[in-house]
Amino acid sequence: MKLPLELRVISHYKKGISPVLAVILLMAITATLSAFIYVYILPWLFGVRYGMEEALSLHYEEIMIDDLYYEDGTLHIYVRNLSPFKVTIDAVYIEYKGEIIYSTTGLGIDVESNDVVEVIVEVTLEYGKSYNVKVSTKRGIIAERRLVLWG
C-alpha cells in the first residue's frame, strides 16, 4: 500500500537518533553515574558503618603467641596483641594428647595495642613430648601454639 505524498514528506523529515548513538549515550550516562557513586556515595556509606561500629563498641580482639620456651620448670609465653585496643590475658592452658594437664585463670595481664608481654608459668613438663599451649583473653579469644620439648 502506497502512502499519499503528504505523509511521505512528513515522515521523511522526522528522524530519531540512530541506535548506535543511543547505545553510546546510555553507556556514557551509566559510566558517569557509576563514577559518581564510587567517588561520593561509597565513602560516605563506609564512614557511617565504621562510625556505628565504634559507637556500638563492636571491636574485635586478636592475640597470638609469638614464642614459647621452657627452661628449668618455667614456661615463658610471649603474647602479642593484634587488636587496636587493650586486651586482658586471663588464662593459660597446657594440653597433652588432648587433655588439659595444667591451667591457671584470673591472670589479669593487660596488653596494650601492638604490644608483646611475657607470661611466665611455673610448670613441670617432660622432654621428648609435644604440648599444646593456649592463652585466653577475658572475652574468651584464644591463641594457641605447639611446644615440642626435645631432649
Image: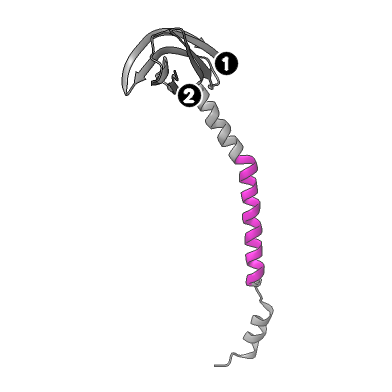
Q: Give the crowd class for mark 1: few <14, some 14-19, many >=20 residues within 10 Å.
A: few
Pick whichever of labels 1 and 2 is earlier in the sequence: 2
Q: Which residue is mark 1?
A: 115
- Residue 135 is marked as none
Residue found at the very far right of the displayed protein: 13
Three-letter amino acid code of the residue under disc 1: Asp
Quadrant where the N terminus lies? bottom right
Question: Does dot 2 land on a helix, a strand or a loop?
Answer: loop
> In the rendered structure, which segment of residues is drawn in magenta?
19-41
Three-letter amino acid code of the residue under disc 2: Tyr
Q: Is residue 42 above or below residue 129?
A: below
In the image, residue 20 lies in the stretch drawn in magenta: yes
Question: Does dot 1 land on a helix, a strand or a loop?
Answer: loop
In the rendered image, residue 63, in percent from the top left (x then y), is placed at 49, 21
Q: Is residue 120 above or below residue 6?
A: above
In the rendered image, residue 94, in percent from the top left (x then y), is placed at 38, 16
Q: Nearer the viewer, residue 140 or 100?
A: 100
**Is residue 84 rendered to the left or right of residue 92?**
right
Label 1 to label 2: alpha-carbon separation: 16 Å
Residue 100 occupies which quadrant of the picture? top left
In the image, residue 83 lies in the stretch drawn in magenta: no
Magenta region, main secondary structure: helix
Residue found at the very far front of the displayed protein: 151
Q: Nearer the viewer, residue 107 or 1?
A: 107
- Residue 60 is marked as 2
In the rendered image, residue 122, in percent from the top left (x then y), is placed at 42, 6
